Amino acid sequence: MSDHQGVLQNRWGHLRKVLERPGPFSHPEFEPSSEILDFIMTTCKVLVIGAGGLGCELLKDLSLMGFKQIHVIDMDIIELSNLNRQFLFRHEDIGSSKAEVAASFINRKVKGCQVTPHYCKIQDYDETFYRQFHIVVCGLDSIVARRWINGMLISLLNYEDGTLDQTSIIPMIDGGTEGFKGHARVILPGVSACIDCTLDLYPPQITYPLCTIANTPRLPEHCIEYVKIILWPKENPWGTAIDGDDPQHVTWIYEKSLERASQFNIAGVTYRLVQGVVKNIIPAVASTNAVIAAICATEVFKLATSCCVPLNNYLVFNDVDGIYTYTFEAEKKENCLACSQIPQTLSIPDPDIMKLKNLIELFCDSAAFQMKNPGLTTYVNGKNKTLYISTIKSIEEQTRDNLNKTLLELGLQDGSEVMVADLTSPNVLTIRLKFPNKNVAS
Amino acid sequence: MSSPSPKSPEQNDKNKKYDRQLRLWGDHGQKLLESSKVCLINATALGTEILKSLVLPGIGAFTIVDGEKVTEEDVGSNFFLDEFHIGTSRAQAATETLLELNPDVRGDYIDDFPDHVMSQTQDFFNHFNVVIATALPEKVLMPLSKQLWSANIPLLVCRSVGFLGYVRLQIREHTVIEAHPDNEAPDLQLDRPWPLLREHLEQTDVPNLGTKERSHVPALTILYYYLQQYRNENGGLLPKTYSDKEKLRNMIRDSLPNENDILEENYEQAVKLVNVCVNCTRVPNHIQKILDDEFCTNLTSESSPFWVICAALREMVQSEGALPVRGSLPDMAADTTSFISLQQLYMRQAQSQAESIYRRAMQISRALGQSPDSISETEVKLFCKHASELQVFRGNCVADEYQTSSPSASLHLEDPESLMFYYVILRGLESFISEYNTYPGQFDDHVEPDVLKLKTLIGKLLTDWGCPTLVISDDRVHEVCRYGGAELHSVSAMLAGCTAHEAIKLITHQYKPINNTFIYDAITSTSATFVL
Ligand SMILES: [Zn+2]
């Protein structure tokens, strides 16, 4: 330990009071002693996912709650628009890795704290990396990433004769904010409701019908979408995909949207709105991030020390009208895709009509799956057959024709298993197809 | 038409830096924030975390008043104090570190205790937009609260101890124009269309539209047509009950030319609008209350623009029987021209009503002898647009709360789950600090005797309020004593985020502030708000 015992005595006096004295509301397993502080300082490893608005707060909160073995992972670099809330970054840090700058700031500021940065995607690491942590805490703005890490922690669970080995559970604390609203939740993988159990809590993204965008725009957003999805591919002014961070691109879209809006007499196209639509910007303030991260950090502290019973298991926050919090127990979904261990079945009434592309649409659009880019394989006569994979160019070309074939034409039968791989999970999902109308079978 | 890109005003560095928050409180909110001055009393972890969430979004300036020196324990829980600060002025150390967060913000400090500052410069605290006090002893809080009450400066009092904390807002009067309600019904005034709107709506012969035209008509036009038909058949009355409304909905549903057709999207939307949009347009009770307020009916030369505009609004409401139309339409499936012409009708009506309110407000202001630039047209427009959201808060003085019995507190004490218990215990804690000059349980061997002392003090408070003293469980008192005044960083950070946003609400006059005491219990991750 890098601290002198004397400094430790006083510096962490606040924490020692709640960890070394018995309390009437502690967790039943809580045994006050100085070993608890030792544990969180020397042994307990916490992974912080995201070094953005929530991540910066989480690193500060955790380091001042005594945690020293912290890892942080984030693939992003620092932008000017981060500085209104991501307080570990300064103007001169723009362009550097969030994880690296945040880690070195905390290590400088909080003596003895060892934050290890990982400037990469969460998908770049496998089970051996994630297995080393006692607790994972997420400050993410992406549902896909949340689902992926959720799936990862579930895949680390050990079941012996159908019984969950408690020591294989790595708790996941998830925080999220949008404007003045936020949530914090405690997930014990395999035990309590996971991210996929509550997928229906995430509202679908707003999309506008193509015919409205193309023919009858009414809103400024319709004009911007027109430029984004119709005009840009046609004119392709820079020969590349739209980069929402390139001011030239945004300005071009702004001008063209303005032009279209004035043709249709539509008011309200502003540069800010264009940017918001192009980059899908979620408003954010320092205060909400502070609140949600602090609640998450308190839960990490409770789980690591057993000093209090952890949140069970979902808290929502809103401070538009006064300050409002509501705590409830989100329920585990019996047939959850990610954590239920129940084989998934999918009933298809018309396999003679349903094409592979319709099946893929179903995986993307249905509230139960909400996938992004699923790749499908199956077994036909005991042999592995790739149905469609879009992420690898050569395979995409080879399997493209399958999209317009019906499920029967592809050789799928009642009881066939389809293996689905998607960005939303590190695990391949096996789905058993059921064709209830036997008479359609060829 | 690819011109060299015009330098959009929205692209400067400041707008980029604040982009994510400007989308919430707007440029006008930001302007108020940037000209605000905030005072923090005591740079505890809670205090500096509050300032952090105010410095980052860019308040104009802050001043820290704190006579303490930095201790080792401070460094353990306060992110803005470093080991090398130990023994130096806490006000100075915190100010210097906080200023690193945002070069646009100015900050200074007074290395002295707030009671000394008040006795030397009586009106020192009156020069701020908001005063925030943390860990302030009762004997200083009382005079400060009284002084700020009479100066009408908002005061936020906070304390964080162990897993508990509270925020108390003291404000004499606070007015809000943009409350940003979550779900607001559209304001269509279909029961009382102004002549231009009526003329426009009656141009469309809804039942005789061709198949193509049918799908182009906005829901509003459809709804208006069948509403008129309903009223003709029902003695001119609007549908009120569920079955009335169902009758109207069925009229729209039955309009399909062929029985087997599916109702078009715009007709579906018209059906959906029935519930919220065919009600009698009336002035909401809470707005009528504001218009009848003495501040609105008895203006003086000191009246704020809010009340002057309210008086002008009141006159319009008296003559028109309704608030000015909001001027915005929800999106509706329709062809561009039908939708835009309808949208523009609403917008123009809103504009002309706002202009007449502006002219009237200017007249009133002039008659009161106020300066001609006290009312701005932009403000009046904003005011009219949000006329149904207006809010007036009148709080009470913390000193009064401490000096009188609190009947609303005793009311909540009947519920054994109520967080009001912690309010009582924290009040007991304040008494303990005043009496013994230390936190209960500060030292390991004092926890048990301090439990008894604290219980006695709480008992005294409850007796004063006429409550049975047994309502507070020993466990809860013991829990607070075991904290020994410990400040847990993550508990403070949660309270600080909340308090900072309350300050932003007060400065920007947007969103509804707490009324008036917020209690946070991190043991159970719950919170509650009480009016005291
Ligand atoms: Zn699940």
Image (cartoon, rainbow, N blue to C red):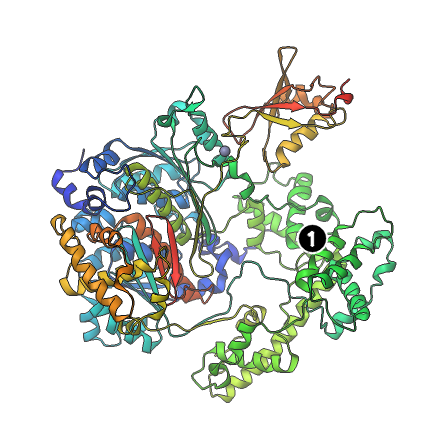
Is residue B398 positioned above or below B419 on the image?
below
Residue at 37% across, 47% down: A295
Question: At which x and y percent is residue A361?
Answer: 66, 32
Q: Secondary structure at mark 1?
A: helix
Along the line of sight, the residue nearer the viewer: A404 or B163 = B163
- Please, which chain is the residue tagged with disc 1 on? A
Can I make out residue B68 in this image? yes
Location of residue B459 by image quarter:
bottom left
Res B34 quadrant in image: bottom left
Q: Quadrant of the C terminus of chain A?
A: top right
**Quadrant of the image for the N terminus of chain A?**
top left
Work out whether residue A328 or residue A99 is closer to the camera in this orientation and state it: A328
Nearest the eye: B481 or B315: B481
Is residue A90 among what the camera can see? no
Q: Residue at x 71, y 52 (%)?
A: A217
Locate residue B168 relative to residue A314 in the image: left or right.
left
Q: Amino acid at mark 1?
A: Arg
Residue B115 placed where, x, y %?
Answer: 19, 70
The spot of residue A127 in percent (x, y) is: 41, 24
Query: Which x, y percent locates residue B292?
Result: 52, 81
Which residue carries the number 1 mark? A260
Is the residue A245 above or below the residue B181 in the image? above
Say few, some or many: other residues with alpha carbon within 10 Å of mark 1 (under 14 / 14 to 19 / 20 or more).
many
